[in-house]
Image (tube, rainbow, N blue to C red):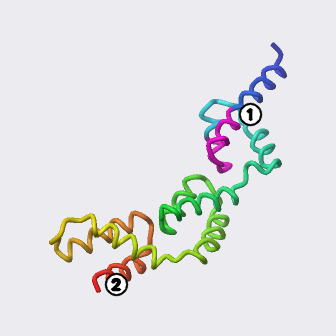
Amino acid sequence: MSSSGQNQNELQKALLAVERLLKIRIRSRHELKTRLEEKYFSAETIKAIITRYEELGLVDDKLFAEQWIQSRLKKPYGRKRIEYELIQKGVNKHIITACLDNAFAEFEEQKTVLNLAKHQAAKYKPGLKKNKLRQRLYAYLSRRGFSSTAIFHAINHYED
């Protein structure tokens, strides 16, 4: 088989791989590149495929970040955790900041953190010492990516 035939065959396989990945969920440019590298496609093929999907609007890091943020706010997770996840997905820092600023302009973080604190506190056994309860709530909310200010406010408000 000629070199051109091999390139065409590799291109077809890469297209199928990307289509399978995008059927599951939208992906960042970096995620697709990494997944294709794991399947040992050539750098030339990867670049061609990703460029093509970007031109079609099927690979768009801004759209990916917006959708990721919305899905994570439903869980709900805080800004720090979502930002960390998007960095791990290879999204540009400027895109992350812009999308987070936009999403958090409408997000009621304080109310959300207070509701989470109440919900989580109800799971702890009755009679848990106040200090231990505060530590556990802080650790839980911190792992979810909320700011220290919002966490302290929620814990203090919850105790009142």
- Asked if residue 19 is among those painted magenta in the image, a careful observer would answer yes
Mark 2 residue crowding within 10 angstroms, few (<14) / some (14–19) / many (20+): few
Determine the residue positioned at 53% across, 60% down.
72
Left or right for 32, reference 72: right
Q: Name the kind of residue labelled 2 in the image.
A: His
- Asked if residue 18 is among those painted magenta in the image, a careful observer would answer yes
Determine the residue positioned at 45% across, 78% down.
111
Outermost residue, bottom side = 160
| Mark 2 and mark 1: Cα distance apart in space | 53 Å
Left or right for 111, reference 140: right
Give the answer, above or below, for where 30 lies relative to 116.
Answer: above
Query: Of the numbered discs in the image, which one, if any, rests on residue 15?
Result: 1
- Viewer-side residue, 141 vs 76: 76
- Viewer-side residue, 147 vs 125: 125
Residue 154 x, y percent position in the rendering: 37, 79
What is the span of residues highlighted in magenta in the rendered image? 17-34
Q: Main secondary structure of the magenta part?
A: helix
Give the answer, above or below, for where 78 lies relative to 2.
Answer: below
Q: What residue sits right under mark 2 in the picture?
A: 157
Residue 5 x, y percent position in the rendering: 82, 20
**Circles 2 and 1: CB distance less than 8 Å?**
no
Determine the residue positioned at 74% across, 33% down.
15
Mark 1 residue crowding within 10 angstroms, few (<14) / some (14–19) / many (20+): some
